[in-house]
Image (tube, rainbow, N blue to C red):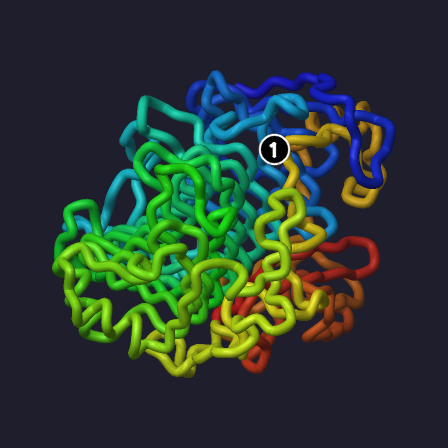
Amino acid sequence: MKTLAVAMLATITTGVVNAQTKPIKIIQGADTLITSSKTWDADTVYFLNGKVYVTNGAELTIQPGTVIMGDTISKGTLLITRGSKIHAVGTSTCPIVFTSAKAAGKRNRGDWGGVIILGSATVNTPTGIANIEGLPPSTLTQYGGGLTPNDNDNSGELSFVRIEFPGVALAPNNEINGLTMGGVGRGTLIDFVQVSYSNDDSFEWFGGTVNCKHLIAFRGLDDDFDTDFGYSGKIQFALGLRDPLVADVSGSNGFESDNDAAGSSNLPQTKAVFSNVTIVAGSDSATNALYRNSAQIRRNSHLYIYNSILMGYPTGVLIDGTATNSNVLADTMVQDNIVAAKQSSKWVTSTTANAAVTSLLLNNAGNRFYTGNAGVLLSNPYNLNNPNCRPATGSPALTGGDFNHIGLVNDAFFTKTTYVGAFAKQSTQNWATVWVNFKPTQGSYTAVNSACATPGSLTQAAAINAMAAEDAKVSKAQVLVSPNPAKGAFKVSISDFTGNVSIKVTNMNGAAVYNKTVANAAKSSSVDVNLANAPAGLYFVTVTNGKQTTTQKVNVIQ
C-alpha cells in the first residue's frame, strides 16, 4: 500500500533552493514490494516506512538530487533483490541522498536501515547461495547465483550517492550496514558513494565480483571496509575516516576480511584487491579503547592491500590465524603502503607470532612506517568537519605507487598513480569535494533545490499530480540497449520514433563519444555502436527526433 503526505520535516535550508518545501511520498508497509519499474524524482522526498523490496525484475530509477529518508521505528530499509536493479545516478552538484528523517541536530547513527543490493554472482558457500545478514531469512533476502553464478551480473548503478545515519538494530548486535552488497556482479557500477555515521560497517561485500571506485566511509561505528564469502572485486580510491572517540564493542577496524566466518578453505577465496586507500582513525592514536587495527586480515582471507595509507589505529596490520599467515608467505598481499601507529612493535603483528611474516611485511614488501602524521604529512586529516587527506609538500605519500603486483599489473580498471593513498596533492584532482557532506547532522533536505529539480514541477501541486499519475504514464517511443552491460559493442533498438532520429552516447562528464543520425527512421530500426576504444564505465544513450527524447544507461565493461 502507498499513501501520499505533505509535511515540513525541517526548516533550515542550504544551497540554492526554492522557498517551497518538497512533498513527502511514503513508501509504506511492513514489507513493501515494488514489483514493477518506478522512477523517483528530485521534487519529492521519499520516506521508507518499513522494509522496501525491489523485486520481480523491477528497476528503480532515482533521479539526481533525490532525497530518500528512512524511518527509525519501522526500520526503513531499501533492498534490491536478485534480478532487479537500482539506477541511482546523481551528479557532483546533485547527489542522491539516503538519510535520516530526523531534524537537524537530532540525527545519529542507526536512525534507519540502509541500502542492500543482492545479485547472482559467485559466493563461496557450499550451495553458492546465502541470506543477507541483518534481515530475517527469506527468498527475498537470498543472494548468490548458486551452482551457475553470473559474475557479470548487473544490479544497476550507484553513482554520486550519499548514505547517512544507517545501521538500525533489528535485534541486539544485529545491525544493517550502510551499503551491503551480496553476490553483486561486476556488471554493476559503484562509483562516488559516501557512507556517513553508520551504526555498523560502512561498506560490506558478501561474495560477488563488483568493482568500486571513489568510496568514503565517514565516522562509522564498526569497520569501514569489510569483505567476506569469497568477494573478489577490485576497489580503487577509497577513504575511511573515523571519530577517534567512537568505536564498536566488537572492536573497530579500517579493513576487516574473512574467507568466511569459520575460516574455511571454501572457494573462491576472498581475494579482493584494494589500491589507493587512505585509512585514518581520526588522530595519531585513537583514544577509544575499542579501536583495533587499520587492517585485520583473518580467517583464511587472501585480501590484497596496495599503495595505501593506514594510520592512527593501535595496530597497523594484523595477520590473524595460521591459514592467513600462510597466505602472506605465498604472495605477500600487503605491499607498498604507508603504515603509521604509535608503537613500532605494532606496525605489523601476527597472531601466531610468525617471524617470517612480520619480517616480510616490515622489510621486504615496500611498506614504509611512521608513528603519526608528523611523518606521513597529510594536509589536515583530523579536522572532521573539513578533512583534507591530500599529501602535503614533502609527504612520503607523494611517491611510491607501484602497480606491478598480483591483481594490479596490466589491469585496465586501475588508474596507475605515482602517489599512494586515496588522493593526489593537487586540489584539482580532489574527488572528495562538492558532492560530499562531512556535516550531515546539520541542514535541511526538504527544500526544493531548483538546480536539481525536474523542470516544470517546482510546486507541491505539480509534484503530487505527477505522483498520482506515475503509474499511468506510458511513453510510446521506446529504446532498448543490448547487451547491457556491454563489452565495448552494443545495439540500440528504437521503435515508434518518426522522422530523422539522432542517437548520441555521452560519458559521465557529458562529453559525446558517439553520434549518428538515422534519416526517416522506420517504425522499428537498430544501430550498432562500438565503444571498444572507450574506457570502462557508465554511458548514456540519448535518442531524439526533436519531439520525443529517451535516454538509457549502458555499463561498458571492457
Which residue is found at the position 72% from the left and 74% from the top?
A: 515
How dense is the environment of label 1, judged by Cα within 10 Å: few (below 14), some, or many (20 and up)?
A: many
Q: Amino acid at mark 1?
A: Ile
The location of residue 48, given as percent across then percent down, is 54, 26
- Mark 1 lies on a secondary structure that is strand
The location of residue 277, given as percent across then percent down, is 47, 62
Judge left or right: residue 443 versus residue 276. Answer: right
Which residue is found at the position 22% from the left and 61% from the top?
A: 269
Residue in front for this viewpoint, 75 or 104: 104
Classify residue 170 by image quadrant: top left
The location of residue 33, given as percent across then percent down, is 45, 29
Judge left or right: residue 191 versus residue 154. Answer: right
Look at the picture and state if 377 lies above or below 136.
below
The location of residue 187, given as percent across then percent down, is 45, 61
Residue in front for this viewpoint, 163 or 502: 163
Which residue is found at the position 47% from the left and 48% from the top?
A: 281
Instruction: Confirm whether residue 222 shows in the render.
Output: yes
Instruction: Determine which residue is flagged by label 1.
Output: 68
Residue in front for this viewpoint, 76 or 278: 278
Look at the picture and state if 171 lies above or below 355.
above
